Amino acid sequence: MSPEPVRGNTLIASGDRRTALSGNSLAVGSMLTWAAGFPAAEILLQTWPPIALIVARLALAVAVMVPIWLLVDGPSRVRRARWARAMWVGGLGFGLAMFLLLLAQKLTDPVTVAIIASSAPLIATLLEIRTGARRLRWNFAFGLVASIIGGLIATSAAVPEQLGLGAACAILSTVLFCWGGMATARDFPDLSQVGRSSITLVGGLLVTSVLLIGAGQIGTEIVPSAPLDMQQAGMLAIYALVALGLSQVLFVSSISKLGVALSSFHINIAPFYVMVILVMLGEEWNWTRALGAGIVALAVVLAQDRKATQTV
């Protein structure tokens, strides 16, 4: 096991502060763009069935990103890409993960899902240790605990009242998402970051399309209740191209530099970014979320303190 995350076959140098800075900057950008999707989703869900919205989001992202990928990597590299592996990684890590998260919220409530999602850094760390990509150090362990605490504070989460199957779906969704991000950054070394993100989102689209067809077969509503107008088209573009497409490229790029564990620390700051966006739209400032975001930011710094050398 190496003391720091593995990027392909090359270890990130301990003293490479520029790599750490760029990796964290990419993660911040990813979470900012991801957060922009929540206000857009609130508007879209007023008329869109959730499973139909997931498919539309992935379809639009893929329709825009794949042509860009062709321009960046070229047709021959696209043809030679590991499509079978991408269908597996994208289908499970993003398609099924999105569906399970949606199911978890339906079976429980947003608070329960938010609490479980704040455990993403822990799950990502366990995945890296399991694959031999990280050796756990004391400073990283302290940062990990602080990140989870900050995430709970940022979501203003109370003790959930409903667990059971819904909680299990949320846990599995978080595991699949962390694994999918790690596998996307690791398993396609010949592709650009746009290519890695695009090919796995195609897999996610395939799985969610099958789920959409299945939902229609059992009588679930899968058609929006209102025609697509200009406002909804704009919100869908933000939700698909900014909060999914661009965010995914930035997140995979961050994982390539920091590893999935450190990159996932930033997920717990997302509620703060959502609040900032809502404040710009007229909502009130929430000091509790600001405190939680500050704790997570401190956790990111603590976990990357290169002076600490003792391992757990």
Image (tube, helix red, strand yellow):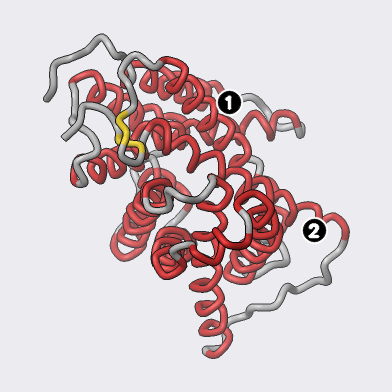
The quadrant in which residue 308 appears is: top left
Q: Is residue 168 left or right of residue 138?
A: right
The quadrant in which residue 301 appears is: top left
Using the image as rendered, state which of residue 145 and residue 24 is in the foreground: 24
Callout in the foreground (1, 2): 2
Return the residue at label 2: 232
Residue at 18 percent across and 14 percent down: it is: 309
For label 2, the crowd category at 10 Å Cα-Cα, with few meaning under 14, some 14 to 19 and many 20 or more, is: some
Question: Identity of the amino acid at label 1?
Answer: Asn
- Residue 236 x, y percent position in the rendering: 73, 56
Height in image: 226 above or below 232? below
Q: Secondary structure at mark 2?
A: helix
**Furthest residue to the top?**
307
- Residue 58 x, y percent position in the rendering: 61, 62
Question: Identity of the amino acid at label 2?
Answer: Gln
Return the residue at label 1: 286
Q: Which mark is residue 82?
A: none
Q: Earlier in the sequence, mark 1 or mark 2?
A: 2
Height in image: 242 above or below 218? above
The quadrant in which residue 167 appears is: bottom left
Figure quadrant of the N terminus: top left
- Residue 41 x, y percent position in the rendering: 66, 53
Residue at 29 percent across and 62 percent down: it is: 164
- Residue 35 x, y percent position in the rendering: 60, 40
Height in image: 8 above or below 179? above
Q: Is residue 10 left or right of residue 94?
A: left
Q: How many marks?
A: 2
Using the image as rendered, state which of residue 44 and residue 76 is in the foreground: 76
For label 1, the crowd category at 10 Å Cα-Cα, with few meaning under 14, some 14 to 19 and many 20 or more, is: some
User: What is the spatial separation of the Cα atoms under label 1 and label 2, in whole angstroms?
Assistant: 28 Å
Residue at 53 percent across and 73 percent down: it is: 206
